[in-house]
Every structure is written in structure tokens, then in C-alpha cells.
Image (spheres, grey):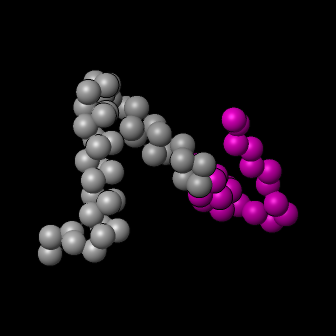
Amino acid sequence: MAIRIKARGGEGVDQMMKRFKKLCEKEGLTKDIKRKEFYEKPSERRRRAARKSLNRRLRAEGSFGR
């Protein structure tokens, strides 16, 4: 899954970097790198997923507690 950027006519390095960063973010690469930066125990991963699911369900019901 290599992300390749080809220079467009008259495009500077800054613009190419901006396009590269946008593509990385779109592919979820930056989020994945941040998630894998530190080791997370499987139990913590399950707990985080359950908490995320609960929040999503409460938000869908419209009773988020506000």
C-alpha cells in the first residue's frame, strides 16, 4: 500500500507535501500510526471499542446525557 505522488506541472514541494499528507489522512495512515505508537493491551482495546460502541448507540438514540 504505497502512496505515490507525481509532480504536476509547475507544482512546488510544499504543494506536493500538502497533497501527500491529505492522501495519508484519507487512507487512515496517520490515524493508524498514532494508534500503534504505543502498545495497547487486548483488554484495553476491547474496553475502548465497547465504550465507543456505547457512545455511538446513545448518540443514535438521542439521549447522550446533556
Question: Residue at 82% of width from left, 60% of height from top?
Answer: 8
Question: Residue at 29% of width from left, 43% of height from top?
Answer: 50
Task: Give the answer, above or below, for where 46 lies relative to 11.
Answer: above
Image quadrant in which you'd find residue 46: top left
Q: Residue furthest left?
A: 66
Question: Residue at 74% of width from left, 49% of height from top?
Answer: 5
Magenta residue span: 1-24
Question: Residue at 22% of width from left, 72% of height from top?
Answer: 63
Q: Residue furthest right?
A: 9
Question: Which x, y percent locates residue 24?
Answer: 59, 49
Residue 21 visible in rendering: no
Reply yes or no: does residue 56 show up in magenta: no
Residue 15 visible in rendering: yes
Image quadrant in which you'd find residue 3: top right
Q: Quadrant of the N terminus?
A: top right
Question: Which x, y percent locates residue 66?
Answer: 14, 75
Question: Which x, y percent locates residue 4?
Answer: 74, 44
